[in-house]
Each structure stands twice: as structure tokens, then as C-alpha cells.
């Protein structure tokens, strides 16, 4: 119940996930699907980021789950980061300028839907 309370209290939700075997990590999938019987996501603005080597199947799966939950996920609040390992350095600093701009754009879109 604590997880549902946190969702209910949140102004918005940012989900950032890797791809595991062409899908969401099982714990994230279960946590989201645990809310199918509720209406908690129907009033929430959500931004989603998938960072992976490819990530397309996870990205589509996450979008479908959030749509099923009734979450508001505008196109500008969705980001697929393909080849993620090559866009950060050994200190985990993002080195790809285009990606930095994409993240800024996503956060601006997300902020507009939350406030």
C-alpha cells in the first residue's frame, strides 16, 4: 500500500528504466501492473525514459502499460536512449550533446504537464 500512497501523493511520475531481454525489468512491470485495478495513474502526468542498447520493445511495452493505466504521457515526455553505454563516460557523465538536449526537452515537457 505504501507504493500506491506514494503514487497518489506525487504531482508527477518519472520512470527511467533499462531494457532486460527486450522488456521491462520484472519488478517495474509488476509494480505498475499492480495498479491496474486502481485509477491512480488517471490523474498523473508521467514521463518515461528507456536507456538501452536498443530498447524499442521495452519502450513500446512501457507506453502500452502506461496507456492502459490511463496515465498522461505526452509525446514530448517520452525518450528512448539507444546505445546508452556509448553516451556516458566512466564517471557516468552524459557526453552526448544531442542526448543532453533531448533530456532537457523531455523535462520541460514533463514540467508543463505537472504544474
Image: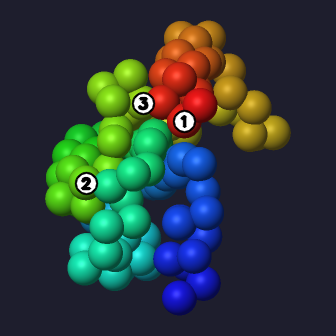
Q: Quadrant of residue 59?
A: top left
Label 2 or label 3, whichever lies nearer to me, is: 2
Q: Earlier in the sequence, mark 3 or mark 1?
A: 3
- Residue 19: mark in rendering: none
Q: Which residue is mark 3?
A: 77
Q: Earlier in the sequence, mark 1 or mark 2?
A: 2
How many angstroms separate mark 1 from mark 2 (CA)? 15 Å
Does residue 22 appear in this view? Answer: no
Question: Is mark 3 in CB contact (under 8 Å) with mark 1?
Answer: no
- Badge 1: few (under 14), some or many (20 or more) residues near its Cα, within 10 Å? some
How many angstroms separate mark 2 from mark 3 (CA)? 15 Å
Q: Earlier in the sequence, mark 2 or mark 3?
A: 2
Label 3 residue SS: helix
Q: Using residue 103 as the reference point, say whether residue 69 is left or right of it.
A: left
- Residue 70: mark in rendering: 2
Q: Nearer the viewer, residue 5 or 48?
A: 5
Q: Which residue is mark 1?
A: 114
Q: Using residue 26 as the reference point, say whether residue 104 is left or right of it.
A: right
- Badge 3: few (under 14), some or many (20 or more) residues near its Cα, within 10 Å? many
How many angstroms separate mark 3 from mark 1 (CA)? 11 Å
Q: Quadrant of residue 93?
A: top right
Q: Position of residue 61 (x, y in %)?
A: 21, 55
Image quadrant holding the C terminus, namely top right
Q: Position of residue 109 (x, y in %)?
A: 49, 22
Q: Using residue 13 as the reference point, say whether residue 46 is left or right of it.
A: left
Q: In the image, is residue 98 above or below residue 43? A: above
Amino acid at each position: 500500500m505504501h507504493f500506491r500512497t506514494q503514487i497518489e501523493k506525487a504531482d508527477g511520475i518519472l520512470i527511467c528504466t533499462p531494457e532486460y531481454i527486450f522488456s521491462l525489468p520484472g519488478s517495474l512491470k509488476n509494480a505498475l501492473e499492480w495498479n491496474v485495478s486502481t485509477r491512480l495513474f488517471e490523474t498523473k502526468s508521467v514521463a518515461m525514459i528507456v536507456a538501452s542498447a536498443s530498447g524499442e520493445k521495452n519502450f513500446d511495452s512501457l507506453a502500452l502499460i502506461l496507456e492502459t493505466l490511463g496515465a498522461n504521457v505526452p509525446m514530448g515526455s517520452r525518450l528512448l536512449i539507444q546505445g546508452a553505454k556509448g553516451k556516458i563516460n566512466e564517471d557516468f557523465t552524459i557526453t552526448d550533446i544531442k542526448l543532453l538536449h533531448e533530456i532537457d526537452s523531455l523535462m520541460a515537457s514533463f514540467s508543463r504537464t505537472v504544474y
